[in-house]
Image (cartoon, rainbow, N blue to C red):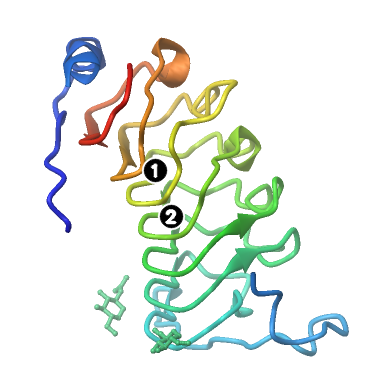
Amino acid sequence: MDSTPELCSMRHLTTCSLTLLLASLIRGQMLNGDEGRPSCSRCDLHLSCNCSYSGFTSVPMVTDQALSLDLSFNNITMVTQDDLMGLSRLRALDLHGNRLAVIHPSAFDPLWSLEELDLSDNQLTTLNHKWFSKLEVLQQLNLLDNPYSRLSSPSLFYGLVRLRRLMFGGSDLKELRTGDLLGVTELDELSVHANNLARC
Ligand SMILES: *[C@@H]1O[C@H](CO)[C@@H](O)[C@H](O)[C@H]1NC(C)=O
Ligand SMILES: *[C@@H]1O[C@H](CO)[C@@H](O)[C@H](O)[C@H]1NC(C)=O
């Protein structure tokens, strides 16, 4: 049932936190360098690469000139340390609607231009603050609808000083703690799906 209403979606976090309180598959190929990796060349003139709905089970190679990469609605199960190597110009990465259960702690480190990251609707049972530690210009982060029961400590979002839009939660979210949003100071929009909280 997909009926989790937005508890919270407003301009100012301070007001919002109050409302809040109320309310493996290993990759198919053996790798010889990059030879075993699938690739996607569906990139337009604006270097926007749309590799959605393509049945990928691992992250395909794309040009390292890519500015945006849509990998939504594939069957990708993990992001390794090397999958996103070289994509230093990438501004938007969409992994919505895959089967991601594993993300290497430094998988996103090469993406130092990344402004938008969508990991929603996957199989992530734990969240790791290390994923985001190098994403200093990240403005938008969507973690909705994964089977994690709480956010991680230390704060996932500490250091994301440019973050403006944040979405998290889902039917498995059981617990919210006051420190969870530590470091998040300038949000324009916060969406939390939290219908099944056991405690705050
Ligand atoms: C990619 O293509 C799909 C349809 O195949 C479309 O729904 C989606 O909006 C496109 N993504 C982008 C970023 O344009
Ligand atoms: C993902 O895999 C399942 C079963 O393996 C298949 O039914 C489904 O069509 C695949 N989805 C995509 C988007 O390729």
Helix, strand or loop at mark 1 = strand
Name the foreground residue: 127 vs 137: 127
34 to 59, vertically: above or below? below
Helix, strand or loop at mark 2 = loop
111 to 160, vertically: above or below? below
Left or right: 116, with 59 as reference point: left
Confirm if mark 1 falls within 8 A of ligand 1.
no
Q: Counting residues from the N terminus, which is met first, the one under dot 1 or under dot 2?
A: 2
Q: Say which quarter of the image contains residue 24.
A: bottom right
Is residue 183 visible in this depiction of the protein?
Answer: no
- Residue density around tag 1, few if under 14, some if 14–19, many if 20 or more, within 10 Å: many
- Picture coordinates of residue 197, whole percent (x, y): 28, 29
Left or right: 77, with 2 as reference point: right
Query: Pointers 1 and 2 in contact (CB under 8 A)?
Result: yes
Q: Which residue is mark 1?
A: 141
User: Which labelled disc corresponds to residue 119?
Assistant: 2
- Picture coordinates of residue 21, whole percent (x, y): 24, 14
Q: Say which quarter of the image contains residue 168.
A: top left
- Picture coordinates of residue 166, whole percent (x, y): 32, 36
Q: Residue at x 24, y 10 (%)?
A: 14
Amino acid identity at mark 1: Leu
Name the foreground residue: 29 vs 197: 197
In the picture, the quarter occupied by the N terminus is bottom left
159 to 137, vertically: above or below? above
